[in-house]
Image (cartoon, rainbow, N blue to C red):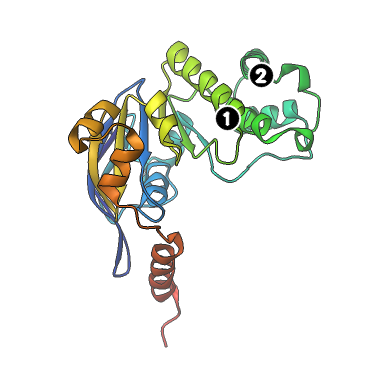
C-alpha cells in the first residue's frame, strides 16, 4: 500500500531525510516513531503530496504522489497534529463539508456520516457546535471525518497528543475497529510508546533523517535486549533531550537561501 525506496529530501545543504526505504502492507497498522526533529514530519509530507522528494521514489496504492496528486489524495485521509475543524460549525456540518469536497454521493454521504458518527459516539451531539466539544471528542470527529470518502490509508500524526488516558484508549479502540472492519491501512506517529506497542503490527524508528530500526515491538525489544518499547527506543536513539527547533531552523535557513531573490 505504501512503498518508499531510497527517499531523500534536502533543503539546500541540509538533508532532512537520508535515503530511507520501507513498505507498509495493505490493512497494516504501522507506527513511525522518532525523536523531535528526526525527519518524521518531512517524510509524512512527501507521502501526502505536500512536498516533492529530492530523490528516490514513493508509491501510495501504486501511484506517485509527486505526479498524481489528486488521485493519491482520494486514497488517503489525514488527521494533522494541529486541530483542523471549523469549530463554529456543528459536528454534522464539518462532516458534510468534507464529503462535498471529496464528491461523496449524497446517499452515501448521509449513510456514512451517520455510521461513522455513531461508531465514534458523536451522533447524539451531531447538531452541537464543534467548539463545545472536549479535546477527545474533537479528535474523534476529525478521524470520523477523515474516513468519510472511504480512503484506503489514514495518516494519524500524533492524534492523541494532550488527551487523557480514557480518551486515548477510546480513540484507539475505534481506530482498530475501522482497521479490522474496513481493512484501512493506518500510518501513525506518536510519542506515547505504549500506544505504538499496543496497536502497531510493525514499527519504524527514524533518527537524524535515517531509519535505524524496523520490526515488531517484540523484535525491537529482542534486538536491544530491553523489556519495553520505550526502553528499546531510548537505547536506539539515546536519552538526550532533542531540540526540534534546531533541525527545523537549519531547513528554514536553507529554504530562505533557495527562495531569496538574486542580487
Name the residue tied to disc 2.
Answer: 117
Q: Nearer the viewer, residue 7 or 206?
A: 206
**Residue 199 visible, this orientation:** no
Give how far across and how far down residue 107 sits, in percent: 66, 13
Give how far across and how far down residue 66 sits, in percent: 36, 46
**Cα separation between marks 2 and 1:** 21 Å
- Is 181 situated above or below 38? above
* Residue at 45 percent of width and 39 percent of height: 190
Give how far across and how far down residue 91 sits, in percent: 73, 28
> What's the mark number on residue 217?
none
- The answer to which of marks 2 and 1 sits earlier in the sequence is 2
Q: Residues within 10 Å of mark 2 (few under 14, many from 20)?
A: many
* Residue at 49 percent of width and 15 percent of height: 177
Element at badge 1?
A: helix
Name the residue tied to disc 1.
Answer: 165
Quadrant in the picture for residue 103: top right
* Residue at 20 percent of width and 35 percent of height: 225
Q: Is residue 229 left or right of residue 22?
A: right
* Residue at 75 percent of width and 39 percent of height: 87
Give how far across and how far down residue 79 sits, in percent: 54, 37
Q: Nearer the viewer, mark 2 or mark 1?
A: 1
Amino acid at each position: 500500500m505504501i512503498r518508499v525506496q531510497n527517499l531523500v529530501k534536502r533543503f539546500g545543504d541540509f538533508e532532512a531525510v537520508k535515503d530511507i526505504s520501507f513498505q507498509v502492507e495493505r490493512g497494516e497498522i504501522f507506527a513511525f516513531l522518532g525523536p523531535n526533529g528526526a525527519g518524521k514530519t518531512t517524510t509524512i509530507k512527501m507521502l501526502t503530496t505536500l512536498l516533492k522528494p529530492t530523490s528516490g521514489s514513493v508509491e501510495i496504492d501504486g501511484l506517485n504522489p509527486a505526479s498524481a496528486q489528486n488521485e493519491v489524495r482520494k486514497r488517503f485521509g489525514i488527521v494533522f497534529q494541529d486541530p483542523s475543524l471549523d469549530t463554529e460549525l456543528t459536528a454534522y456540518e464539518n462532516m458534510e463539508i468534507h464529503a462535498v469536497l471529496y464528491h461523496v454521493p449524497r446517499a452515501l454521504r448521509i449513510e456514512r456520516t451517520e455510521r461513522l458518527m455513531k461508531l465514534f459516539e458523536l451522533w447524539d451531539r451531531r447538531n452541537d457546535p464543534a467548539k463545545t466539544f472536549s479535546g477527545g471528542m474533537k479528535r474523534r470527529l476529525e478521524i470520523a471525518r477523515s474516513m468519510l470518502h472511504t480512503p484506503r490509508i489514514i495518516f494519524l500524526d500524533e492524534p492523541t497528543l494532550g488527551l487523557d488516558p480514557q480518551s486515548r484508549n477510546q480513540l484507539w479502540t475505534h481506530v482498530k475497529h475501522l482497521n479490522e472492519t474496513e481493512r484501512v491501512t493506518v500510518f501513525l506517529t506518536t510519542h506515547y510508546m505504549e500506544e505504538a506497542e499496543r496497536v502497531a503490527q510493525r514499527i519504524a524508528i527514524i533518527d537524524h533523517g535515517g531509519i535505524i530500526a524496523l520490526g515488531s515491538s517484540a523484535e525491537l525489544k529482542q534486538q536491544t535486549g530491553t523489556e519495553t518499547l520505550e526502553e528499546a527506543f531510548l537505547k536506539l536513539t539515546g536519552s538526550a533531550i532533542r531540540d526540534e527547533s534546531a533541525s527545523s531552523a537549519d531547513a528554514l535557513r536553507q529554504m530562505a537561501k533557495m527562495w531569496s531573490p538574486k542580487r
